[in-house]
Image (spheres, rainbow, N blue to C red):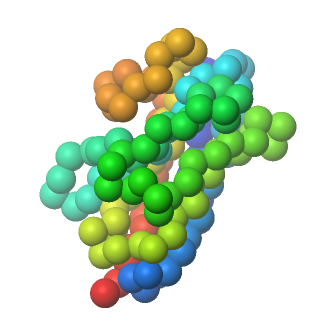
Amino acid sequence: QVQLTESGGGLVQAGGSLRVSCVASGLGWRSYTMGWFRQASGKGREFVAAVNWDGGRTYYADFVKGRFTISRDNAKNMMYLQMNSLKPDDTAVYYCAADRNIIRFSMLDSEYDYWGQGTQVTVSS
C-alpha cells in the first residue's frame, strides 16, 4: 500500500509561483510512475504532468508546458510540482498520484492506483 500526501497549496497572484509537494510512503512507490492531476470547481479531473520512476522522463499537458516542472527525489520520498507564471485558470485542487504499472506512462487518471487528498491552489487576478 502506498500513501500520498500533498502540501504547499495556497493563494498566489497571477504571474506568481508556487511549489506543491507530495510525500510518499509505503512499499514499491519508488518504482512507480508518479503524476499530478488537478480538478477545478465544477469540472472533471485533468492531467497536469507525470514523471517516471527515476525522474529521467517527464510529460506535460499542453496548457502547462514551459510553466510547470515536475520532479521527484526518491531518497527524500518526495515529488514536486513547481508552478511558474500562474494564471487564474490554474486555480484547482491539485492531486498527486502513483501508477503501479512501471512500464506505463499514462495521462489517464483511471490508470493511477494511489491518490493523495489534494491541496488547493488559488490564483487571483
Q: Residue at x 34, y 66 (%)?
A: 90
Residue 26 visible in the shown view: no
Q: Count numbered badges in the picture.
A: 0
Residue 4 is situated, as x and y percent measured from the top left of the image, at 59, 39
Which quadrant of the figure has residue 76?
A: top right
Which quadrant of the figure has residue 19?
A: bottom right
Which quarter of the rendering shows the N terminus?
top right
Residue 65 is situated, as x and y percent measured from the top left of the image, at 42, 54
Q: Residue at x 29, y 44 (%)?
A: 46
Q: Is residue 75 left or right of residue 65?
A: right
Furthest residue toward front: 66
Q: Is residue 14 left or right of residue 119?
A: left
Residue 97 visible in the shown view: yes
Above or below for 73 versus 1: below
Residue 23 is situated, as x and y percent measured from the top left of the image, at 67, 45
Above or below for 97 versus 40: above
Q: Is residue 59 left or right of residue 123?
A: right
Q: Nearer the viewer, residue 11 or 55?
A: 55
Furthest residue toward left: 42
Above or below for 66 versus 17: above
Furthest residue toward right: 75
Q: Residue at x 70, y 29 (%)?
A: 54
Which quarter of the rendering shows the C terminus?
bottom left
